[in-house]
Amino acid sequence: MIESYEYNKTHNPLNPNVVMATAASTVGLISVALLLTVYLSIILGGIAVVLALLSRGSDKKLLPQAKRGIIFGTIGMAIGYFLLVQAFVTFFTDPEARTIVNKYSEAISGQSLDDSLKELKDSFGITFE
C-alpha cells in the first residue's frame, strides 16, 4: 500500500505546522459551537484564525486543516460580533429589554444600569443637548 506524498504532508503528526493547523481547525469549530457565549466565540475565533495563518510557516499554501480553521474562526467571530451588536441595539431601543437589564443590574450590584450610565456620563461631563 503506497500512500501519496500530499496525504503524508498534510497528516504528519510530527510536523508542527500540521499540529498547529489541526489545532486551528479544532478551536475554530469550538468557536462556532459556543456562539451563544458571545465573548468566547469571538476570542476563540480570533485564536483559530491566527493559528491557521501561523501554521503556514514558510509554505505558500495553507493546509486543509488551516483553511477549515480560518472558515470556522471567521464564522465564530462574525456571528459573535453580530450578536454583541444586536444585544446593544436591543438594550438601547427596546424599553422592555432595558427594564429587564435594569432589574438584573439592581439585583447584582444594587444600582440600575441606567443610573450607572448616568453617573458615567456625569463624570465625563457629557451632554446630549
Image: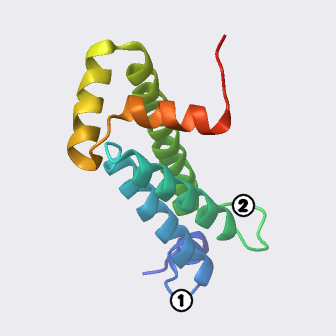
Instruction: Check the image and report above or below for 129 versus 34.
Output: above
The residue positioned 26% from the left and 16% from the top of the image is 96
Most distant residue in the bottom direction:
14
- Residue to which mark 1 is pinned: 14
Could you tell me the amino acid type at mark 1? Leu
Q: Position of residue 116 (x, y in %)?
A: 43, 37
Q: Is residue 3 left or right of residue 36?
A: right
Q: Position of residue 8 (x, y in %)?
A: 54, 78
Q: How far apart are marks 1 and 2 (CA)?
A: 19 Å
Q: Which of marks 1 and 2 is nearer the N terminus?
A: 1
Instruction: Check the image and report above or below for 12 versus 87.
Output: below
Quarter of the view holding residue 99: top left
Quarter of the view holding residue 46: bottom right
Q: In which quarter of the image is the C terminus?
A: top right
Q: Position of residue 111 (x, y in %)?
A: 32, 40
Closer to us: 4 or 90:
90
Instruction: Check the image and report above or below for 69 versus 126.
Output: below
Closer to us: 114 or 47:
114
The residue positioned 42% from the left and 14% from the top of the image is 93
The residue positioned 64% from the left and 15% from the top of the image is 128
Could you tell me the amino acid type at mark 2? Lys
- Residue to which mark 2 is pinned: 61
Closer to us: 125 or 69:
125
